[in-house]
Image (cartoon, rainbow, N blue to C red):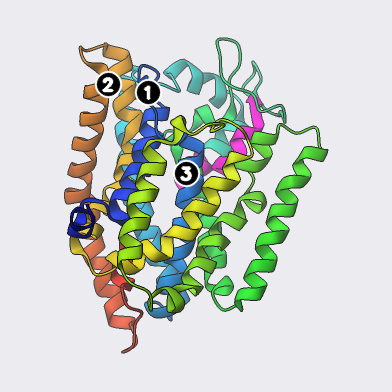
Amino acid sequence: MLSMVSGGLCTMGMIRVALAMAVVLSHLPMASFKFLSGGLAVQSFFIVSGFYMSLVLDGKYRDIGLFYSNRLLRLFPTYFVMCALTALAIWVFNASPTASPELFAQMFQNPVTAAVLIFENLTMLGQDLLFWFSVAPDGALVLDTSGPLPDETTIVGWQGLLVPQSWSLSMELLFYALAPFLARLRWQWIAALALASIGLRLAGHLTNIDYLLWQGRFFPTCLFMFLLGMLGHRALPFVSGLPKALGWLAALALLAFIVGYTFIPGASELGMRWVVYAVVALTTPFIFNAFKDNKLDRWIGELSYPIYMTQLFVIGAVLTFSPPMPIVLSISGTLALSLAILLLVDHPIDRWRQRRAQTAREPASAPGAASAAAL
């Protein structure tokens, strides 16, 4: 078994793909089997992102401007491709699982709402906050802290997003803005900020705000997850002195945890979130240490972002046209489109990003930093 894991069948890349597939399955209403919930998978990505951004800032980027521009080059090309494809699906085929031409027409009749949606669809900034608003009959955004869900009579602000799942990228962008400064702090300060973020999250129980909205769509209450990843990176000097077999075991255990999560007693309880955060944060340094120089690991992991970004487009087409074997087509279609975007969009731009980083890189860069480029 360990030989299979060490051979690349259960790597950090596979963990990231499993998390992305967890989101896909959570959005497939016809799928009876689920992995870890989509929300927890996204938040697990925040932990992994914190780890890798701390890594690259420690050894790959000394120029903050280059860090920022390369992060934008990582996220936006695929995002804009999916915006274009989704616009085609909505206005030509009316094949979106979350929106319709009529819904956009209603929202854009209000000039303020129209301006907000144009800004957020172009920049991704603030998309998470649209979950806090419902839409009035005249198209106006109305603050609604009850955590509204869309139905036949309720429109929620995020339905005006071409790529609704990109709300999490809004949080990623906010973290990227802070990351160069956080990376300079001593680990004690990072831990203190994480505790403050956790305290703020728990304080949501004292408010009348829907708790899932408070803990999942508000950057200050999610910041601690990125910080847990940064603390995991600070543990690398200790982890690197341990046998890599621990990383192989950790990868196998985490993959089993993600795939078999629904079979864990009490998995649906709110408190289990903290178990997920702890498991991902504790295992990530060990897994990275074992597979940091594995090129196959990096290639597999690069698929996670396009899988995350293409899923609703493919699911919308399947739900609209009702082909046979909808689950198989949803998953295979997502993987096929993701592979096409990886090869035609991500890889060419990634080569440019790497050249830019290589030009500015100092002689001593962190081991395994190149594997972080895919995040």
User: Which numbered marker is on residue 327?
Assistant: 2
**Do labels 2 and 1 touch, CB within 8 Å?**
yes
Measure the C-alpha gap from mark 2 to mark 1.
8 Å
> Which residue in the protein does label 3 denote?
42
Helix, strand or loop at disc 2? helix
Examine the structure image and report whether residue 49 is included in the region drawn in magenta: no
Which residue type does callout 3 highlight?
Val
What is the magenta range? 118-134
Which residue type does callout 2 highlight?
Ile
Measure the C-alpha gap from mark 3 to mark 2.
21 Å
The percent position of residue 184, horizontal first and vertical second, equals 56, 79
The percent position of residue 103, horizontal first and vertical second, equals 50, 19
Count residues near mark 3 (Cα–Cα under 10 Å), then give few for <14, some for 14-19, many for 20+.
many
Q: Is residue 82 left or right of residue 282?
A: left
Residue at (61, 16) in percent of width and height? 154
Q: Quadrant of residue 325?
A: top left
Examine the structure image and report whether residue 125 is included in the region drawn in magenta: yes
Q: Is residue 158 above or below residue 239?
A: above
Q: Is residue 259 left or right of residue 269?
A: left
Q: Earlier in the sequence, mark 3 or mark 1?
A: 1
> Which residue in the protein does label 1 denote?
28
Q: Earlier in the sequence, mark 2 or mark 1?
A: 1
